[in-house]
Amino acid sequence: SSSSSSSSSSIVSVMATTNSLGTMTGTLRATSYSPGASPPLLSIRRLSLNSMADVPDAASRAFRRDDDDSANSNNNFEEEGHNVGVVQIEAELPFTVSWMLRPAAAAGDGVAADEEEEGEDPFFTSIENNTSYDNDKEEATTGGGKSSSSSKAVRSPVDLLIDQELRKRMQIFEERFEATFHLRDKGYNNDHVRFAQAAMSNLLGGISYFYGASSVQIADDDEDTKRQQTFSSFNLPLFSAVPSRSFFPRGFLWDEGFHQQLVHKWDVNISLDVLAHWIGAVREGGWIPREQILGDSANRRVPHRFIPQLADVANPPTFLFLIEKLLVMDDQRKYQQQQPSVVLPADYLVRVYPRIRRWCEWLLESQEGPVPGSYRWRGRKQTSPDGGPLHPNTLASGLDDYPRATNPDETEYHVDALCWSITVVRIMAALAAHLGNDEDHALYSNKDGILTQALEDLHWNPRTKSYCDVGKHSAGGTFETRYMYRCAEASSSSTTDVAVARDVLEARGNPCPKSHPKPLYPLGDGQGGLLSKEYFVPGKVVKHQFVAQYG
């Protein structure tokens, strides 16, 4: 279509479909509105077919309006054996094309398209379709002669084609999902299966590619110097799923190992690519940042104070569960027992082993506890009376708010950190044996025995008959109400909110920490009062003991 009155040519493509293979019948009408203009030349050609077969020259036909005809030129076309076609119309401008398609089965019921309404813009090209679609019967029917200007919405042939393709893809997904996870065979009902399909689809849809540098922070207890020791590392790529596309659109080390427990069943090649990217993020010393906040898009979704990654903070090595699965698959490859579609490259484990070993050695060394055989997650700090969570969190462990010792310090040790260390040495021993590395197999097998005994010696609580954390802990304590106060840095607009006791607030002193020494104002609760939060104050009796808290 063109709004120019000059003589030129234009191509208008329309796509027509029928529900089944057969004869496709339609009517094309071209109208010239320019007084005295020569009759428009129409060329109707088949451009593409569902069978993708070449179309002979005979399929191309040209029509010229008779001089004594009215302003309209009507031409019928028929093609057999195809259910998808593209018609190309080439004509001098200005002109208008309206068209109607009806399936061969209903061709006898077809009605010619209505005449154009008076006053129609002569320089407007319209595509009119009175073909309706019954979603239940999944077949095309004619519009019963209704005008294209009807108030009822009309679905175009392209819409129908997309719907058909979506239904086909959904069926393929559902069949593959059942063949992979066998939920219906296991007795799950339709609601359970639909829920699982949605979760799996969302997980696969969240797999993303990132590129950029991590912000790294050297561990330091001094708030004033910590900010000065933050720097950007080298750029690197990451191919990874994400915990939540809307809220956490970035890679998390702990989460990704669990993601790949499902993904590798769906497509092991995706898991191999993801694992290679994460292992490629191993630093020289063996550390992998817990969160991969790479690129501007990822950084914009994270509060500034949470972007730097502490270089001594770990995460549970859940990727080792995937390594276990790959060991089984590699055995199947060696003995030719695997399915043809699941083939682990022969040298894959050999190539990733050095970096996996470096990462695991860093974990075993960096998270060691105060006594031989003990392990402690780094990054856990006492909840400050100035603010922080109700109970000291342990983000590194993956169990953020698990109730550990009330008074965290360097003398405590965590039962789950030791259990993860045992998992590390056992899987590394199996991997080394699989690759024929006898020296490493003996090394990790020996560590397995030492750490397993440490679990019994250090963490077994005979009173509760359970394995517990050990640390400075108060069996009692009270909850106190604190009030939120906003503070700012001395030389910038960066702010932080701290929790202060009522007496401090009433004394009108400066409740702000050294990192943000400039007091601003107390926060309101939106209802005329002050915003408050509960804060746990340990009891007076604090001693080094088993932490018998659960869940």
Image: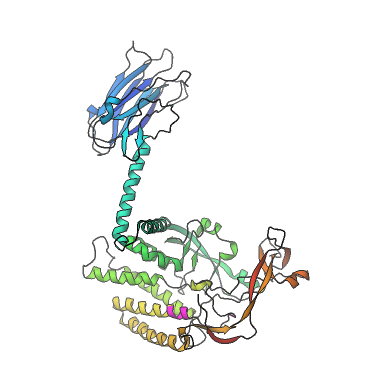
Q: Is residue 414 magenta?
A: yes
Q: Nearer the viewer, residue 16 or 87?
A: 16
Q: Residue at x 58, y 61 (%)?
A: 303
Q: Nearer the viewer, residue 119 or 207?
A: 119
Quarter of the image for the N terminus: give it.
top left
Q: Nearer the viewer, residue 398 or 5?
A: 398
**Vertical comparison of 220 with 235: above or below:** below
Residue 260: x, y in percent?
A: 38, 65
Magenta residue span: 404-419
| Most common secondary structure along the magenta stretch | loop
Dividing the picture into quadrants, the one containing residue 19 is top left
Residue 85: x, y in percent?
A: 30, 34
**Vertical comparison of 132 with 3: above or below:** below
Residue 275: x, y in percent?
A: 38, 66
Res. 299 in view: yes
Residue closest to the far top? 68
Residue closest to the far left? 336
Residue 492: x, y in percent?
A: 68, 61
Res. 24 in view: no
**Vertical comparison of 169 with 441: above or below:** above
Q: Is residue 328 left or right of residue 219?
A: left
Colour scheme? rainbow
Dividing the picture into quadrants, the one containing residue 242 is bottom left
Tally the marks.
0
Q: Residue at x 23, y 37 (%)?
A: 53
Q: Is residue 530 magenta?
A: no
